[in-house]
């Protein structure tokens, strides 16, 4: 796939996300000025980032590079990412937007997780993925429903804000996605880590988890030993 095609696809995905923000109530607060470039040296704690002196702002504050390839290992095996976020583009501060490129090895599993502060729009650039999320069943609110789809290059899948979702790279070739969030701080919480991780072990008892999952305490102990 040529770099020109990739650039066009990425640009279209951003426009799609921006258009979506125009018609829905976004979680991030609306900006009160044309821009508020993040000041990485500021020590003031605010909901977002403190603004850089507008007189010191340059075009570099609104640009980044490196999304032609993934540069960092993801939090789960078999995946790497590069992000266009407020950390790499200070000018994104208060604009409610984050974009991430992910590359996956065949068979890579994207564990169930939640973005508590953002809706996700995923565009498949290469490969085949099973993407889906869980929600309350519209036909019966006492039950759950899963909405999943096999997505190929050019397909787009949307995950509503705050819902548990998952993915898997299928096929025999590497896969690539571009993901857009309507927040500069989407949140990224793995369900398994939050329930079974060492950080929460002293707050969530084995007995509570065993009863919740309807298994023996030894099963919970075995699962926790993996985290």
Image: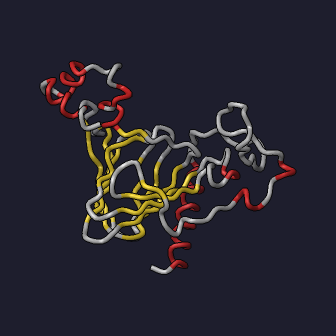
Q: Name the outermost residue toward the front.
A: 225
Q: Nearer the viewer, residue 215 or 163?
A: 215
Q: Give me the residue at 46% from left, 50% from top.
A: 120
Residue 18 found in image quarter: bottom right
Q: Give me the residue at 26% from left, 60% from top.
A: 107
Q: Name the outermost residue toward the right.
A: 55
Q: Residue 143: x and y, percent? A: 23, 34
Query: Would residue 109 be found to the left or right of residue 186 on screen?
Result: left
Q: Give me the residue at 62% from left, 54% from top.
A: 88
Q: Residue 175: x and y, percent? A: 36, 66
Rendered-image quadrant of the C terminus:
top left
Query: Would residue 48 be found to the left or right of residue 71 on screen?
Result: right
Q: Give me the residue at 68% from left, 31% from top.
A: 45
Q: Residue 160: x and y, percent? A: 43, 45
Q: Is residue 14 above or below residue 140?
A: below
Colour logic: secondary structure
Rendered-image quadrant of the N terminus:
bottom left
Q: Nearer the viewer, residue 174 or 6?
A: 174
């Amino acid at each position: 796939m040529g770099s020109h095609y990739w650039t066009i696809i990425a640009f279209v995905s951003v426009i799609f996300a921006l258009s979506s923000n125009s018609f829905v109530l976004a979680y991030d607060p609306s900006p009160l000025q044309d821009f508020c470039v993040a000041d990485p040296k500021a020590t003031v704690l605010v909901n977002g980032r403190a603004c850089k002196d507008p007189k010191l702002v340059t075009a570099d504050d609104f640009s980044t590079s490196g999304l032609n390839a993934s540069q960092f290992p993801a939090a789960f095996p078999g995946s790497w990412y590069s992000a266009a976020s407020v950390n790499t583009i200070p000018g994104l501060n208060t604009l409610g937007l984050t974009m991430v490129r992910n590359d996956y090895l065949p068979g890579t599993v994207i564990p169930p997780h939640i973005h508590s502060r953002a809706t996700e729009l995923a565009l498949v650039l290469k490969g085949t993925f099973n993407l889906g999320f869980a929600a309350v069943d519209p036909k019966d609110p006492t039950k759950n429903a899963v909405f999943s789809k096999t997505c190929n290059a050019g397909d787009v899948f949307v995950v509503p804000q705050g819902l548990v979702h998952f993915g898997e790279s299928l096929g025999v070739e590497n896969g690539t996605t571009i993901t857009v969030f309507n927040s500069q701080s989407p949140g990224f919480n793995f369900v398994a880590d939050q329930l079974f991780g060492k950080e929460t072990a002293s707050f969530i008892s084995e007995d509570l988890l065993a009863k919740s999952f309807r298994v023996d305490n030894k099963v919970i102990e075995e699962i926790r030993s993996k985290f």
